[in-house]
Amino acid sequence: MSDALSNLIGALAGGSVRVVDLTQPLGESTPVIDLPPPFAPSPGVSMETISRYDEGGPAWYWNTLRFGEHTGTHFDAPVHWITGKDLADNTTDTIPVERFVGPACVIDVREQVAADADFLLTPGALEAWEREHGQIPACSWVLLCTGWSERESSEEFLNIAADGPHSPGFHVDTVRLLADARDVLGVGVETVGTDAGQAGGFDPPFPTHTIMQGSGKFGLASLCNLDQLPPTGALVVAAPLKVVGGSGSPLRVLALAPA
């Protein structure tokens, strides 16, 4: 066994490295993105018991699950968006597995989001973060800590008004900077999707999906516990289900962080 792996095992056993769960529970109350007509909606989560120590299976319990690929804490593969549909290795079963693991850069904007639900992280704000914490390295996960996961009801979480949903996200120029100049693995957010709530009216519409997926990058949505991570120094493992031709899937996102 390599020294690196031995040291990691020892650090986990000794408590100097802790495992942080960045995943929301997946159940029938999980909020799902609400698309207006004429777009096809994604179903909520449903569970149907196959057997539970009964005549259907006297010694075992299991369920049939039904949900959309982009439900709860989930992964966006490049093929999820039209800009990424023709890229190589763009589905959940073809992405090289080493691309699911990378260092985390956590940008805390909870104060700004508390004052403005439509807050967008600008390139200037990103560069100010880098002046304090160092430039974001290639193949990193950039995680936006907004406090949004603390919203308990679906109504608060989706935050839909007469003019559509309102939630924070990335400015289009910031997405371009991260995809091109920083060459990140992808971005992660606490909201229902990686784009801000009003992003349908941006230029281009839904720029985080358009640019990230079009650049062969990934998205992580509906994360939680980002406030438990340091700005740098954590490692994130975000591996989707190996769905053949999959555009994404719910997943368990774990971070290894210093205690």
Image: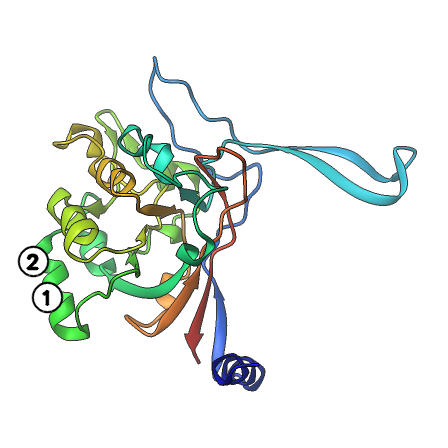
Name the residue nearer the viewer: 27 or 194: 194
Residue at 46% of width from left, 43% of height from top? 94
Where 117 sits versus 253, above or below? above
Residue 120 seen in render: no
Location of mark 1 (residue): 128
Per the image, label 1 sits on a secondary structure element best described as helix
Residue 9 seen in render: yes
Name the residue nearer the viewer: 150 or 184: 184
CB under 8 Å between discs 2 and 1: yes
Seen as rendered, the residue at the extreme top is 38
Q: How far apart are marks 2 and 1 (CA)?
A: 6 Å
Where 3 sits versus 222, above or below? below
Spot occupied by residue 22 in the image (x, y as percentages of width and height): 45, 58
Seen as rendered, the residue at the extreme front is 88
What amino acid type is highlighted by mark number 2?
A: Gly
Where 38 sits versus 33, above or below? above
